[in-house]
Amino acid sequence: MIDVYYWPTPNGWKVTIMLEECALPYRVHAVDIGAGDQFKSEFLRISPNNRMPAIVDDEPAGGGAPLAIFESGAILEYLADKTGQFLPTAPRERFRVLQWVYWQMANFGPMMGNANHFKNYAKNLVDDPAQLEYGRKRFVGEVDRLCGVMDAQLSAHAYLAGDDYSIADMVTWPWAILTERLVDEEAGKKYSHFKRWLDEVGARPAVQKGRAVHKEWGERQLTPEQEQARRELLFNQTSEKVRKAREEAARGAGV
């Protein structure tokens, strides 16, 4: 059994989609990032970067004690190797997939997150309109560029890494579905190959099921006070706060 530490966000969906695609049994544990669960000592012992998702595999590949893994890209790569699915073993084909996984982790995901912050959240946090506009244009513009990269790749291939569906698609799709609300509503017309891929991946039963895992957690209504507290928690983290939480986690683990 695999324990999944999760909240219904794009990064969380990556893992539940992969688990559904591989038909692996799993248990879901809520990590309410708006309530500060990511700073709890028991979670930090699994994910020292105080970010979800993370997993603990009770029956890890290679045997031995339960294995904890954090970072969504590493989790998908591990599950692919464990099951022999969605990631080739031959070096040429394997790295054709992994380069797109790393592209998502280093480029598309972070740029989407920054664009979403400046377009949808920072207006409530930043008083200087010029500063806000610079951040919005910088990151929304980069998302637009990256969508163009994907569209060009998908004009020649059915999927991101070639003609076979892979973890490259699973790691990218959960962020890609947010593109229209960040770039513009006409993104589907502008990036026709990207839109075709978005629809085809989204039609997969395992993708739909993985995205729907505890959907209700993310749809709950917050009071203005709760929403303000959530923003303070998510956007005002400091090294000192993280260091203290990590030290508490280490003491709890006896290390």
Image (cartoon, helix red, strand yellow):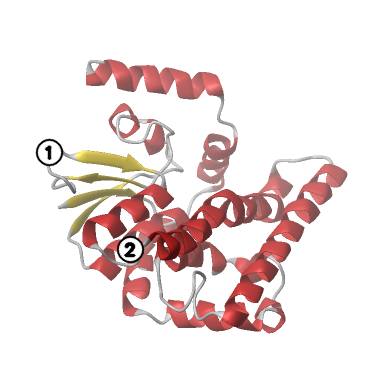
Q: Residues within 10 Å of mark 2 (few under 14, many from 20)?
A: many
**Left/right of residue 2 with respect to residue 7 in the rendered view:** left
Where is residue 76 shown, x and y percent of the image? 36, 55
- Residue at left 21%, top 68%? 23
Residue 105 appears in the rendering: yes
Pointer 2 residue: 18
Distance (Cα) linking label 2 and label 1: 23 Å
Res 38 label: none
Looking at the rendered image, the quarter that the C terminus falls into is: top left
Where is residue 142 shown, x and y percent of the image? 72, 57
When the figure is inspected, residue 100 is found, relative to residue 227, above or below; the finding is below
- Residue at left 18%, top 46%? 60
State the image quarter where residue 235 is shown: top right
Q: Amino acid at mark 2?
A: Met
Where is residue 230 shown, x and y percent of the image? 52, 41
Instruction: State the SS at label 2.
Output: helix
Closer-to-camera residue (139/87): 87
- Residue at left 28%, top 30%? 42
Q: Residues within 10 Å of mark 1 (few under 14, many from 20)?
A: few
Pointer 1 residue: 64
- Residue at left 85%, top 46%? 129
Closer-to-camera residue (41/206): 206
